[in-house]
Image (spheres, rainbow, N blue to C red):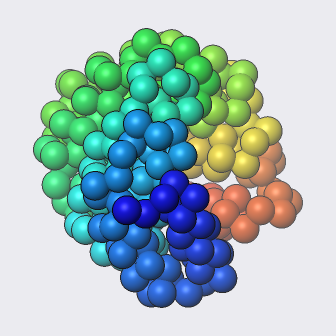
């Protein structure tokens, strides 16, 4: 039987291969390790952590290699690793695996299955107090609302996104990022329900979002771009241009390339509206 120390060393080897960019070799090693660890005694904390790491690393590698269906199954295996619900580290690992599984399922077009996993995650960990697991729950709730939107369950998407937006603190990076994503779902759902003026009003929440962190900055700017598009559809071109100008003034010159992509999109929208 493989010892806990051997398991840990094997995990380190997989991680090293991954870090060097040799994804195929890392995957081969991760799959061999995951298979050899199937009968391991997870009562030993080192064994348990190694088993989870082997399964999760395999899932990550499959994701990076674009094999999302297999990745979803691998994340499910990682999430099935026995865990102590009172240990915040183990708790957040399982939540993270479930979240990634749902994202993969949605990416391959299985929205119903993704929805089910998001709901399981939220139900299981909704009362978690440690910040990392709580973060996973928030992300799952926002993603759940977006999945409902994709399934054209607009009223449910609107309610789900609205609940998250109302609860989150917009003055933190994570809160602002997830609020902006929730607002995007709200606005899209309202437009689909032929309630575009309400969609514009929903976007007013963005004014209170702290976008100092890059993730929040990208999501807030993108949500404002969505709002400008809705204003343009209502033949309120001047208001739409004002929204774009306000957003550009905030983020132009940001050195992050992802923010730069949003800047390019905002400029293109403004040019079209200005004629």
1, 228: nearer the viewer: 1
Number of numbered tags placed on the structure image: 0
Q: Percent position (x, y) of residue 245?
A: 72, 47
Q: Quadrant of the N terminus?
A: bottom left
Q: Is residue 206 above or below residue 13?
A: above
**Location of residue 161 by image quarter:** top left
Q: Tell me the residue at 54%/26% (across/down).
A: 88
104, 143: nearer the viewer: 104
Q: Is residue 202 above or below residue 102?
A: above
Q: Percent position (x, y) of residue 11?
A: 54, 65
**Location of residue 153 by image quarter:** top left
Q: Tell me the residue at 19%/59% (across/down).
A: 109
Q: Tell me the residue at 18%/36% (across/down).
A: 116
Q: Is residue 60 above or below residue 201?
A: below
Residue 241 shows up from this direction = no
Q: Tell me the residue at 32%/22% (across/down).
A: 124
98, 160: nearer the viewer: 98
Q: Is residue 41 left or right of residue 88?
A: left
Q: Percent position (x, y) of residue 26?
A: 49, 80
Q: Percent position (x, y) of residue 222?
A: 56, 48
Q: Residue furthest front?
A: 1
264, 22: nearer the viewer: 22
Q: Is residue 120 left or right of residue 168?
A: left
Residue 176 shows up from this direction = yes
Q: Quadrant of the C terminus?
A: bottom right
């Amino acid at each position: 039987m493989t010892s806990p120390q051997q398991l840990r060393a094997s995990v380190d080897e997989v991680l090293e291969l991954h870090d060097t960019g040799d994804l195929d070799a890392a995957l081969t090693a991760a799959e061999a390790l995951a298979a050899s660890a199937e009968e391991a005694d997870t009562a030993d904390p080192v064994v348990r952590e190694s088993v989870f790491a082997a399964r999760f690393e395999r899932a990550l590698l499959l994701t990076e290699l674009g094999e999302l269906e297999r990745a979803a199954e691998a994340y499910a295996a990682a999430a099935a690793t026995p865990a102590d619900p009172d240990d915040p580290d183990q708790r957040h690992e399982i939540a993270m695996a479930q979240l990634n599984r749902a994202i993969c399922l949605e990416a391959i077009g299985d929205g119903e299955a993704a929805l089910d996993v998001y709901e399981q995650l939220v139900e299981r960990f909704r009362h978690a107090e440690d910040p990392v697991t709580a973060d996973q729950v928030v992300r799952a709730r926002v993603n759940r609302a977006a999945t409902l939107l994709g399934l054209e369950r607009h009223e449910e998407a609107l309610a789900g996104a609205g609940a998250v937006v109302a609860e989150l603190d917009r003055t933190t990076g994570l809160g602002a990022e997830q609020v902006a994503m929730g607002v995007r779902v709200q606005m899209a759902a309202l437009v689909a329900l032929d309630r575009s003026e309400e969609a514009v009003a929903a976007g007013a929440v963005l004014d209170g979002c702290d976008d100092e962190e890059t993730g929040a900055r990208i999501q807030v700017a993108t949500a404002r771009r969505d709002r400008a598009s809705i204003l343009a559809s209502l033949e309120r071109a001047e208001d739409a241009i004002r929204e774009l100008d306000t957003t550009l003034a905030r983020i132009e010159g940001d050195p992050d390339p992802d923010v730069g992509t949003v800047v390019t999109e905002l400029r293109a929208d403004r040019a079209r509206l200005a004629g």
